[in-house]
């Protein structure tokens, strides 16, 4: 599909067709990341922020904290 780059204030704008945004999972007011890669403009959907309480609610396993070896003290570490 082809489209045109148009002026929008001091910027340029491109309309994204509905089927493109649906396939990419982009909805109105979603955040996207824009960058240039090898001369191409890339638009990437940003993942939505998930609250800690939502992450905890989804957790189904058991958390088993443990210790790990970080090596011998060097410098002025406290024992």
Image (cartoon, rainbow, N blue to C red):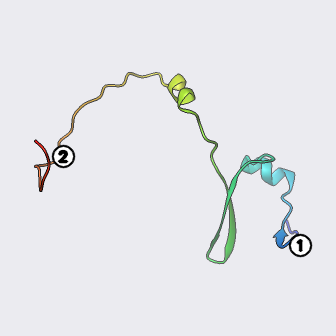
**Disc 1 to disc 2, C-alpha distance:** 56 Å
Front-most of residues 38 and 36: 36
Q: Quadrant of residue 11?
A: bottom right
Q: Say which element carries label 2.
A: loop
The residue located at (83%, 58%) in the rendering is 16
Judge whether 14 appears above or below 23 on screen.
below
Question: Could you say where residue 51 lies in the image, as x and y percent from the top left?
Answer: 58, 33
The residue located at (47%, 21%) in the rendering is 60
**Circle 1 residues within 10 Å: few <14, some 14–19, many ≥20:** few
Front-most of residues 74 and 54: 74
Q: Residue furthest bottom?
A: 39
Q: Is residue 76 left or right of residue 36?
A: left
User: Could you say which disc has been placed on residue 7 in the image?
Assistant: 1
The residue located at (70%, 51%) in the rendering is 31
Q: Is residue 6 left or right of residue 38?
A: right
User: Could you say which disc has been placed on residue 70 in the image?
Assistant: 2
Look at the image and tell me in which quarter the N terminus lies.
bottom right
Sequence-wise first label, 1 or 2: 1
Front-most of residues 73 and 38: 73
Judge whether 36 appears above or below 49 on screen.
below
Judge whether 7 appears above or below 69 on screen.
below
The residue located at (50%, 26%) in the rendering is 56
User: Could you say which disc has been placed on residue 17 in the image?
Assistant: none
Task: Check contact, mark 1 vs mark 2: CB within 8 A.
Answer: no
Look at the image and tell me in which quarter the C terminus lies.
top left
Question: Could you say where residue 12 lies in the image, as x and y percent from the top left?
Answer: 83, 71
């Amino acid at each position: 599909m082809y489209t045109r780059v148009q002026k929008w204030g001091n910027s340029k704008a491109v309309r994204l067709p509905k089927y493109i945004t649906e396939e990419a999972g982009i909805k109105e007011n979603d955040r996207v990341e824009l960058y240039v890669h090898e001369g191409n403009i890339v638009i990437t959907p940003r993942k939505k922020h998930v609250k800690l309480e939502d992450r905890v609610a989804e957790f189904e396993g058991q958390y088993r904290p443990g210790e790990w070896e970080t090596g011998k003290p060097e410098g002025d570490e406290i024992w």
